[in-house]
Image: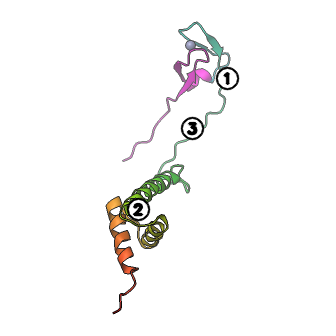
């Protein structure tokens, strides 16, 4: 059997405007009107009354658009950019021009998603050999 909660104990966090200390309040407390944050710094601030908490628990339901969906993608892009920059600089040290290394990296990335700088570099170098004109005579 799977257990579901029989109630909730939600804490809301308020920040003292004077000293920025954070204070935790029970939801039930801030649902009552006329509550104050009495901070240790002698600042007393009235709390806005919470009437409709937005917490909802869902069971066995996956939301269609997870909030964190784009986060790994963004990290991947940054990682890839870092790899591209690194490989471009290595290729430059090896005597390739900026345009040449850009082209090689683009060629590799159009086919695969390299997992490391070494892999991208190796494939870019393979690519550079493929592009060499066949020597005649
Ligand atoms: Zn304070």
Task: Work out whether residue 116 can be spotted.
Answer: no
Q: Which residue is mark 2?
A: 92
Disc 1/disc 2 C-alpha distance (Å):
60 Å
Give 32 or 66, whichever is nearer the viewer. 66
Where's residue 132, x and y in %?
39, 80
Q: Which residues are magenta?
A: 1-30
- 23 or 53: nearer the viewer: 23
Label 2 secondary element: helix
In which quarter of the view is residue 88 placed?
A: bottom left
Residue 136 in picture, x, y percent from top left: 35, 91
- Residue contact between numbered discs 1 and 2, judged by CB atoms under 8 Å: no
Q: Write down which quadrant ligand 1 falls in.
A: top right
- The dot on residue 18 is none
Mark 1 or 2: the one toward you: 2
* Apparent side of residue 94 relative to residue 30 in the rendered image (left or right): left
Residue hosting label 1 = 48
**Could you tell which of marks 1 and 2 lies nearer the N-terminus?**
1
Numbered circle sitting on residue 55: 3
Q: Residue furthest top?
A: 42
Is 24 on the left-hand or right-hand side of 89? right
């Amino acid at each position: 059997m799977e257990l579901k909660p029989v109630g909730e104990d939600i804490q809301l966090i308020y920040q003292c405007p004077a000293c920025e200390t954070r204070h935790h309040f029970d939801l039930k407390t801030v649902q009552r009107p006329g509550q104050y944050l009495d901070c240790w710094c002698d600042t007393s601030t009235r709390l806005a009354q919470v009437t409709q908490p937005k917490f909802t628990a869902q069971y066995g339901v996956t939301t269609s658009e997870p909030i964190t969906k784009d986060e790994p993608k963004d990290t991947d892009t940054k990682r890839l950019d870092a790899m591209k920059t690194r490989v471009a600089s290595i290729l430059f040290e090896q005597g390739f021009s900026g345009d040449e290394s850009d082209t090689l990296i683009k060629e590799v990335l159009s086919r695969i998603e390299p997992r490391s700088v070494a892999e991208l570099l190796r494939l870019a170098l393979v690519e550079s050999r493929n592009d060499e004109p066949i020597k005649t005579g």
